[in-house]
Amino acid sequence: MFSHDQRPYDWVGAWSEKRARLSPDSVGLVDATTGERFTYADLDARANRTARLLREEGVVGGRAVGEDEDGERVAVLSRNRPELVDLFFATAKTGGVLAPLSHRLAGGELVEMLNDVDPALLVVEDPFADLAERVLDHENREFDCSVLALSTGEGDSDADTSAFDSWADALPEDDSPVESADVSMDDAHLFLHTGGSTGVPKETVLTHGSLVWNSFNTITAWGLRPEDVTPMVFPMFHTGGWNVLSVPLFHLGGTVVIAREFEPSEVLHLVESEGATLLVAVPAVLRMMANHDDWADTDLSTLRFAKSGGGPCRESVMEAWWDRSVDLSQGYGLTECGPNNFTMPEGWPREKADSVGVPVMHADARVVDDDGEKLPAGEIGELELASPHAADRYWRNEEETEATFGNGWVSTGDLARKDDEGYVYIEGRKKNMYVSGGENVYPAEVEDRIADHPTVEEVVVVPVADDQWGQVGKAVVQGDETLTLDELTDFLDGKLARFKRPRHLDFVEEMPMSGPSKIDRQAVNDEFGDE
């Protein structure tokens, strides 16, 4: 890819400067919460002020910290707001690293993560000041950094931020151009943590090169345009908040719309009011939008396409969007690679809707067995990916780095198959597969069929012990609790083989979540999988 032996590229640290020069008056960012609109000239000026602040706080990088060292880190606990975009562009200028953290984590988890990240600066939005106080007072705290508070601008807050200095007060007035740091394509720019369904989340190291290549892949494979507009419904501590559409559109000169909180009705409103052309969301958000009272009356005609990511999208949800003439298809990605790895060819047939498509221009995909041998079309094995947009490593975690990145391919941990035309189908997590009567059962396939039942809103299938078959499935359903196992079995007749049909049925009022509208399968398994 790129190496430190090559000369640094000035444009690597000049994302906002270059775009401001090319399209200064184009709106790059809309804050739907405040109504503010920022041109690319505005964003570069804000980035210059922020870069000066970061240098005052010691958040630097490139050769300033040493030939083989990564830049200093700035950690953030915040909802989506313009200051995170400022920090993204500013760390590019200073050679620092942006490490946004989930404000949904517990204090003990955040202490461990911040000990690992070891930031020079922690930026905290007002609503999470109490959480930050608990972290800073925690007995296991090892990191030492300055802290700045972001005001919500909503008057008095329940959170007491008096212990922290104000970001606004610390921000220099000077927004004139700053000199970019001496960095190259393989210098770190962004730390994004994994979902962390087991244990403390791992920090994934994304380089400038990773970000640029993912942007190239997205623009070329999805056909992005400078006039594109998208509501960004993923949180900015998630790869979806940056790499799915935000960074590619910043690269092109498009428009990204953010908000502190996104309700389905607001997303529908923004699609219409902003003339959104692109939308990417998790299946649950797409389902809630399609079920909302405003769905039928919302003008969706500006949407060129929509994509579902973060899990399988049910057929009923896809059909609801197709009925509104929106080209909805499924995507696939992960923090460690991309995340934009697949695309649907032009004129793709609806019978391929269960697939995630074919690899993008600058990525490759293969399906391998437990020995790492490539499997023929139709056979299920682990999905591996290769691309210059892959992450560099896990931060300070050599063992996990070797397991995921060690063979030149990114081992995803997901089961998949390819058909004869090269379309890839995701069959679920490798660790979730179970064996019933000597037959492999893939929960994703079973869940997909159960979800077609009109009384089922969400479903997770977990294995439970069985004296005859070793293991059988239990369907854990969110939905109408009048549904019986016999009714479900009859519904699945002809749709699933007998050994795949659940032998047990249980209900939850609401599925536990481990991320942005992402079901916490481990929590479901812990509660319902031990019989």
Image (tube, rainbow, N blue to C red):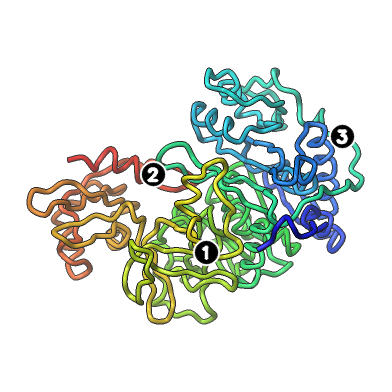
Q: CA distance from mark 2 to mark 1?
A: 22 Å
Evaluate whether residue 325 shows in this view: no
Q: Is residue 211 left or right of residue 460?
A: right
**Res 101 label:** none
Residue named by callout 1: 307
Residue named by callout 2: 520
Where in the figure is residue 204, as x and y percent of width and height? 56, 47
Q: Is residue 6 left or right of residue 287?
A: right
User: Which is more N-terminal, label 1 or label 2?
Assistant: 1
Residue sitting at x 28%, y 55%:
433
Residue sitting at x 35%, y 76%:
376
Q: Where's the C terminus, which quadrant? A: top left
Residue named by callout 3: 172
Residue sitting at x 45%, y 58%:
411
User: Which is more N-terminal, label 1 or label 3?
Assistant: 3
SS type, badge 1: strand
Amino acid found under the numbered disc labelled 3? Pro
